[in-house]
Image (cartoon, helix red, strand yellow):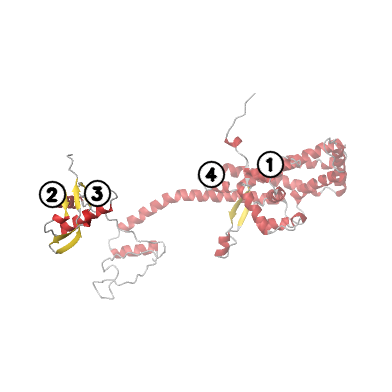
């Protein structure tokens, strides 16, 4: 037995099916069913106003508002059931554009999911195609209608099943096939150059279908028109008797429901080919849509071919035009050729305080020297580019300044060492000092006073201890700019350690 192959598609959840079991599934399913019914009628894009109008027709949605619908549509878009596209064709103001009026289309997943749910209601799903053979077979089946009047119920029942299966396949296949051509993916694909390879095959396929459609639809219309109401009732009653006789173990269906179902299918088939209530038939619409698709394919193919060949054609035209300009012997002849080739230019007149070399009003633009004028954009976000200036290299200045500081510190150290006697500087024993020495000594004194253990360090790295005066003795310090009195402190230096 083959084992299950695990891949990303199998392991991830399918968001598109959430609407079937969500809390508000009754609203979501109703909205998507309406989209699907319109999809079957080849109305692929819907406005929210159309959806609300349809929902309000039902009693369950009498209190349903546009706000509720917007919320539900947003949820269905987030679950990828609907594909929104902004509609700018009905926009009249900037405010309407900002509010984003959307049209909505069923996604491919949603179409298949709705089709699956309808399969539970006896709807068959087939692959999309346009086969004239289905029309041919349908014509043959309808041609046997009058014979069914005299056949037994079982034969009529088999005939009815075959007729409905063929009609269902035709209806579903053409809807899907035509829907593919109106999808965004098809729009993008038809704009590529690779599409040219398949263009002829598409057109031939559609033209064959149109020929079969023209040939068979007229015959089917003639057959349906010649069927009388009496013959219809006879055949429908035989179909009803056959369907009623089928045993159903799991459910019981009322006779009225069976009969309504049979009549509904028959009237849908007639309306598809003959139209109803004065409306155009689906067969006629299919003919017009198929022709429109052929015109669309041809138009896209022509645009692709033109864009692919235009570059080569223009290149030769430009080469020839340049040769003509080069052959002009005078500037005046080049001006005339330019006027013929490009027409009248739309010059821009720039007013400003320009420095002209002549004041003559008769001098032309070619008589004066060119003047370069920089035009700045008139937008709020524009900013002039700042000129990038490199950081100057001051390495030499830094080295010279460092050398100077080191020399000053060395000189200062030598001076201060001269004031130390037996490892002590006594403020009471100082001789005449200048202001620089005084400032340095007072700085050391402040460090010692502020230190918890009365120890500190000089700028040169020597450690000293502050010794307070005995009995609060005071002293007179003589300076070049005057004397001052202070406590007789001493700075006791520790011996220098050789490094």
Which dot marks residue 452? none
Q: Are marks 1 and 4 in contact (CB under 8 Å)?
A: no
- The residue where tag 3 is placed is 456
> On screen, 390 above or below 368?
above
Q: Which residue is mark 1?
A: 132
Q: Earlier in the sequence, mark 4 or mark 2?
A: 4
Q: Is residue 249 above or below residue 215?
A: above
Query: Is 266 or 354 nearer to us in this picture?
Result: 354
Question: Is 484 situated above or below 173?
Answer: below
Q: Residues within 10 Å of mark 4 (few under 14, many from 20)?
A: some
Tell us which disc is closer to us: 1 or 2: 2
Pointers 3 and 2 in contact (CB under 8 A)?
A: no
Asked whether, in this view, residue 12 is left or right of residue 36, the answer is: left
Question: Is 302 situated left or right of 165 in this image?
Answer: left
Which residue bears the numbered disc 2? 421
Q: Residue at x 50, y 45 (%)?
A: 193
What separation in Å lies between label 4 and label 3 (alpha carbons)? 90 Å
Q: Nearer the viewer, mark 4 or mark 2?
A: 2
Mark 4 = which residue? 195
Q: N-terminal of the two: label 1 or label 3?
A: 1
Q: Nearer the viewer, residue 459 or 79?
A: 459
Q: Earlier in the sequence, mark 1 or mark 4?
A: 1
Of badges 1 and 3, the one in the foreground is: 3
Distance (Cα) linking label 1 and label 3: 109 Å
How many numbered discs, if any? Answer: 4
Which residue is at a point 13% across and 56% down the rendered structure image? 430
Residue 16 vs residue 411: left or right? right
Q: Is there CB contact under 8 Å for labels 4 and 2?
A: no
């Amino acid at each position: 037995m083959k084992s299950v192959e695990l891949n990303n598609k199998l392991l991830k959840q399918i968001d598109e099916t959430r609407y079937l079991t969500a809390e508000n599934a009754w609203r979501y399913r109703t909205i998507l069913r309406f989209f699907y019914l319109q999809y079957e009628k080849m109305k692929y894009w819907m406005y929210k106003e159309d959806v609300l109008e349809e929902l309000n027709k039902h009693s369950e949605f009498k209190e349903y508002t546009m706000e509720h619908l917007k919320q539900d549509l947003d949820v269905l878009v987030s679950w990828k059931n609907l594909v929104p596209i902004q509609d700018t064709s009905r926009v009249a103001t900037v405010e309407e554009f900002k509010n984003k009026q959307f049209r909505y289309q069923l996604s491919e997943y949603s179409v298949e999911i709705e089709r699956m749910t309808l399969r539970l209601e006896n709807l068959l799903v087939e692959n999309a195609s346009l086969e004239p053979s289905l029309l041919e077979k349908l014509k043959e089946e309808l041609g046997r209608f009058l014979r069914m009047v005299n056949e037994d119920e079982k034969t009529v029942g088999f005939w009815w099943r075959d007729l409905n299966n063929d009609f269902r396949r035709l209806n579903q296949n053409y809807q899907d096939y035509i829907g593919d051509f109106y999808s965004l993916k098809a729009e993008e694909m038809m704009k590529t150059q690779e599409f040219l390879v398949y263009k002829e095959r598409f057109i031939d396929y559609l033209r064959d279908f149109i020929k079969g459609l023209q040939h068979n639809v007229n015959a089917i219309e003639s057959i349906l028109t010649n069927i009388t109401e009496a013959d219809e009732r006879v055949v429908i009653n035989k179909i009803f008797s056959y369907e009623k006789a089928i045993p159903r173990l799991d459910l019981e269906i009322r006779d009225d429901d069976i009969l309504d179902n049979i009549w509904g299918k028959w009237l849908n088939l007639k309306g598809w080919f003959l139209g109803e209530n004065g409306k155009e038939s689906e067969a006629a619409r299919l003919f017009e849509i198929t022709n429109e698709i052929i015109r669309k394919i041809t138009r896209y193919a022509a645009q692709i071919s033109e864009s692919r060949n235009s570059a080569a054609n223009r290149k030769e035209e430009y080469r020839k035009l340049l040769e003509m300009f080069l052959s002009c012997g005078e500037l005046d002849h080049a001006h005339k050729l330019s006027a013929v080739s490009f027409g009248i230019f739309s010059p821009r007149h720039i007013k400003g305080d320009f420095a002209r070399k002549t004041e003559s009003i008769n001098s032309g633009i070619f008589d004066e020297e060119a003047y370069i004028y920089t035009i700045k954009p008139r937008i709020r976000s524009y900013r002039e580019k700042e000129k990038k200036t490199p950081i100057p290299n001051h390495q030499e200045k830094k080295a010279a300044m460092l050398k100077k500081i080191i020399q000053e510190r060395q000189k200062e150290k030598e001076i201060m060492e001269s004031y130390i006697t037996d490892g002590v500087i006594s403020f009471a024993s100082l001789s005449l000092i200048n202001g620089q020495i005084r400032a340095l000594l007072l700085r050391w004194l402040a460090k010692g006073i502020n230190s918890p253990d009365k120890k500190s360090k000089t700028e040169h790295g020597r450690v000293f201890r502050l010794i307070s005066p005995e009995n609060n003795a005071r002293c007179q310090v003589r300076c070049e700019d005057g004397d001052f009195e202070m406590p007789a402190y001493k700075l006791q230096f520790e011996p220098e350690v050789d490094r």
